[in-house]
Image (cartoon, rainbow, N blue to C red):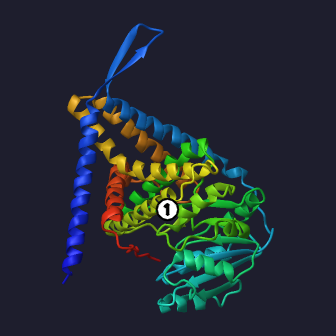
Amino acid sequence: MVPLGNRATSLLGSLVFLGVSALLLAFGYITGFVTMSLQINAIPIAVGFLEAEFSVLSFGAFILVSAAVFLAGLARRSNADLAADAGRVTAVVPVYRDANVLERSVESLLESDYEDLEVLVVCEPDDPRTQDRAAQLAKQEGVDYLVNTRAPGSKAGAINYAVEETDGEYVAVFDADERVDERFVPAAVAKLQGSDVVQGRTVPEPTGLVESFAYYESVLLNYVALRLLYVFTEFRMAASRAVVLRREALSAVGGYDEGMLTEDFAFAHECYRERLDVTELLAYPSQIDAAHTVRDWWGQRKRWMTGYAQVLHHLLASVRPLTDYRNPLSAVIGAATVLGSLFMLTVLSKFAVLLVVGANLLFVVPLAAIAGVTYLIHWLDHARGTVSRPGWPGLLVPLVLPVYSLAAVKAVFEYLFTWTGEWYRVSKEA
């Protein structure tokens, strides 16, 4: 039986979620009918149009331009240099209840083209099954494991503990379910000769309907949507998987923040504030295990967005306007990430306005553009052997943004009103 207090909290969270979602949809719909005008001075005419038309076309143009920049980055794959041996790399693999997938990361790292690479699996004290699996894998040369007795229950703590217990010149971090390309580590170390942190790309394997949804979401939100931010600022994501960095970089930011639900998002902002040089490496992506059920997909996205809200709270609390401009700008970027995720829901209302007024062409063109560029990226990933070929689930691409926005609404407002520190963990398959 669920305690009365928990039921009341759950009910409050549901009511807030439904209310805010309805308000965002209504706001987008009502403002979509506002008439706007454009005065062209060279030609004595004024063009009138609906706000919904402007929003939808602007959104489509943003996706197209961002996708073009991303595709240009993917095309530079052949220019990636490789360093066979430039110092010891310690590949840290923090794990929790990952016994059935741990072999993916460990075995792929052992096949790396980088010579001086050690793999260190960090297990949790209350996970004997994964400890046993790590011990079996540690019988191979170049693999070791330890138990996270320093900060149990924290991925950030596990990484920090591993760094304290090793002395390699470079540190890399991978998830248990990553299949790491054998060229990634040497390519990352080569880039580290002029950088502090090198962040690789991770690609969910689109093996089914939910998995394909996760893949398209990754393409649109994790990579395409960030392109213009990367063009106009020096902010770069620096995560806690598929990342290789100098040991000094971790010391500069005090390691990963053990109090953050999304330690990677917090780490990226600390790197930016400390002026660390973060370089993106799109070549040689890691294949990762996608969420396999709707429940896992939803729970994982809620956890991420709750973590983003938590990080934004921290960024706002630590704003120092009179210091380096990156300090307040970091908070602005964090706010844009969270608010942008919320207001994506209003785009759905804009499309509804276009249907009501009969602007069918304007309705179709942006959706076709979104689906087209996503399919193009999928075909490119397939041609390079990263994922399976595109299929009919690609038709669901336009649903990615509003559904993700719904998860963001629930997560952010639960964080503000009802979150008590819990987090969701997805199940992983071998």
Of residues 47 and 370, the one nearer the viewer is: 47
Q: Is residue 345 above or below residue 1?
A: above
Q: Along the horizontal axis of the image, is 63 left or right of 397?
A: right
Q: Is residue 373 above or below residue 216?
A: above
Secondary structure beneath label 1: helix
Q: Residue at x 39, y 57 (%)?
A: 213
Determine which quarter of the picture holds residue 140: bottom right
Mark 1 crowd level (few <14, some 14–19, many ≥20, 10 Å Cα): some
Q: Position of residue 402 (x, y in %)?
A: 33, 50
Q: Amino acid at mark 1?
A: His
Residue 191 visible within the image: yes
Q: Position of residue 39 (x, y in %)?
A: 41, 15
Q: Quadrant of the N terminus?
A: bottom left
Q: Along the horizontal axis of the image, is 34 left or right of 415?
A: left
The residue labelled by disc 1 is 314
The single residue placed furthest to the right in the displayed view is 86
Q: Residue at x 52, y 68 (%)?
A: 263
